[in-house]
């Protein structure tokens, strides 16, 4: 068996130890005589998995009292509608900060449910930086302010937390959740699909402050109503049980590695290796403002895009896959989530060096 270094933006690489444990437990989970996939979500076995996963998430993220953790479905794109359906009711208008393709999509979807004010946008500069908060035009009467903490396509990331006063801050953290410590208390709501840093696709994590429950617009489907899901412990409908189980194994693994501080150190070290190389290269480049660069997704371009196909072929031959950039921007992208070992980034940098020497 040979495992590749998988730089996919999502679904993405998972810790090998987790996959091995899942394989060991596939046919018989701890003497239950069943696979987790076959368990009733209301049975005691799965209930214990669900509770443990939720407790681990609370512990690792430092989620304070006064917040609910919801395990939902529909992904972050689903949340683009579910968030406004649940929160817009407070005033009928919301602020969106547009820093890339994902937050732009969020703002567009929200317009169905209320008035959307684009408080700031970096689209004019091709999403290569996060607009300074001093340039934002926030509406004090907004129901919430929405940001995307890490733009998976453009490779820009918030390295600071916006101040929104009494207006709840909402963040799409799909691609950087659990990658570093954050102060959950500064957010009204955090959401993200699991398939970048936590586990398989199909599971959506929502962390919501209690006072934001119960504001849903009447059109909100019950299964997507945060209050209804909170009161049912995320079991109003059948939750994505197997994805929750794998997420639990990943969280246990991350805890054993030292939690959020250790993840942040590991991720910063990997990103530094790659950015340092790119900044000193005359063949490859990354155009993002240094202070806003993502430690999760690193887009880069070859000097001559006619070499893109050859570059990708050579990478594949060296066991490095999924480096092609998003179709909307072209170029390359290395997604280096928690589960990407430093050896993967070292191998990539070595290949970049060799490619530059032979083609630069
Ligand atoms: C991947 C991603 C999404 C899309 O998630 P789905 O699970 O496909 O809905 C949205 N936002 C961000 C920041 C992402 O990285």
Image (spheres, rainbow, N blue to C red):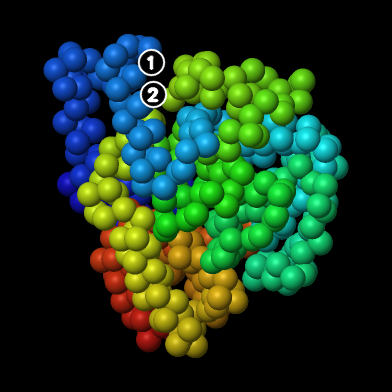
Mark 2 packing: few (<14 Cα in 10 Å), some, or many (20+)?
many
Going from N to C along the chain, the mark reached first, 1 or 2, is 1
Question: Disc 1 marks which residue?
Answer: 41
Q: Residue at x 45, y 43 (%)?
A: 63
Q: Residue at x 51, y 65 (%)?
A: 294
Is there CB contact under 8 Å for labels 1 and 2? yes
Q: Residue at x 34, y 66 (%)?
A: 265
Where is residue 218? Give x, y as percent: 77, 20
Question: Disc 2 marks which residue?
Answer: 241
Q: Quadrant of residue 338?
A: bottom left
Residue 304's tag is: none
Q: Residue at x 26, y 55 (%)?
A: 258
Quarter of the picture containing the C terminus is: bottom left
Circle 2 SS class: helix
Q: Respond yes or no on whether mark 2 lies under 8 Å from ligand 1.
A: no
Taking depth in this image into account, of 185 and 284 the one nearest to the observer is 185
The Cα atoms of the two marked residues, 1 and 2, are separated by 7 Å
Mark 1 packing: few (<14 Cα in 10 Å), some, or many (20+)?
many
Circle 1 SS class: loop
Query: Is residue 299 shown above or below 83?
Result: below
Whether residue 62 sits left or right of residue 96 in the image: it is left
Whether residue 305 sits left or right of residue 2 in the image: it is right
Where is residue 1? Give x, y as percent: 17, 47
């Amino acid at each position: 068996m040979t495992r590749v270094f998988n730089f996919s933006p999502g679904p993405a690489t998972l810790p090998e130890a987790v996959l091995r444990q899942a394989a060991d437990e596939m046919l018989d989970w701890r003497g239950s005589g069943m696979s987790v996939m076959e368990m009733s979500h209301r049975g005691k076995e799965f209930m214990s998995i669900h509770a443990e996963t939720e407790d681990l998430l609370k512990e690792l993220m430092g989620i304070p009292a006064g917040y609910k953790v919801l395990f939902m479905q529909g992904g972050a794109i689903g949340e683009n509608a579910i968030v406004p359906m649940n929160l817009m009711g407070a005033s009928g208008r919301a602020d969106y900060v547009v820093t890339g393709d994902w937050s732009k999509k969020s703002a567009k979807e929200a317009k169905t449910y209320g008035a959307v004010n684009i408080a700031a946008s970096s689209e004019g500069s091709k999403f290569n930086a996060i607009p300074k908060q001093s340039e934002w035009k926030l509406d004090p009467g907004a129901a919430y302010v929405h940001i995307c903490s890490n733009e998976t396509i453009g490779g820009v990331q918030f390295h600071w937390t916006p101040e929104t006063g009494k207006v709840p801050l909402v963040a799409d953290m799909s691609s950087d959740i659990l990658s570093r410590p954050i102060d959950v208390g500064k957010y009204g709501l955090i959401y993200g699909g699991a398939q970048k840093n936590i586990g398989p696709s199909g599971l959506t994590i929502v962390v919501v402050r209690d006072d934001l429950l119960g504001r849903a617009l009447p059109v909100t489907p019950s299964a997507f109503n945060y209050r209804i899901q909170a009161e049912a412990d995320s079991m109003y409908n059948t939750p994505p049980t197997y994805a929750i189980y794998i997420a639990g194994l990943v969280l246990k693994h991350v805890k054993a590695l030292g939690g959020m501080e250790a993840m942040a150190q590991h991720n910063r070290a990997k990103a530094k290796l790659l950015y340092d190389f790119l900044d000193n290269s005359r063949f490859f480049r990354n155009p993002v403002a240094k202070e806003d660069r993502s430690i999760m997704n690193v887009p880069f371009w070859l000097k001559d895009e006619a070499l893109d196909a050859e570059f990708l072929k050579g990478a594949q031959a060296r066991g490095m896959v999924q480096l092609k950039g998003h179709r909307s921007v072209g170029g390359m992208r290395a997604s280096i989530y928690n589960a990407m070992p430093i050896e993967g980034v070292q191998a990539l940098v070595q290949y970049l060096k060799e490619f530059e020497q032979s083609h630069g």
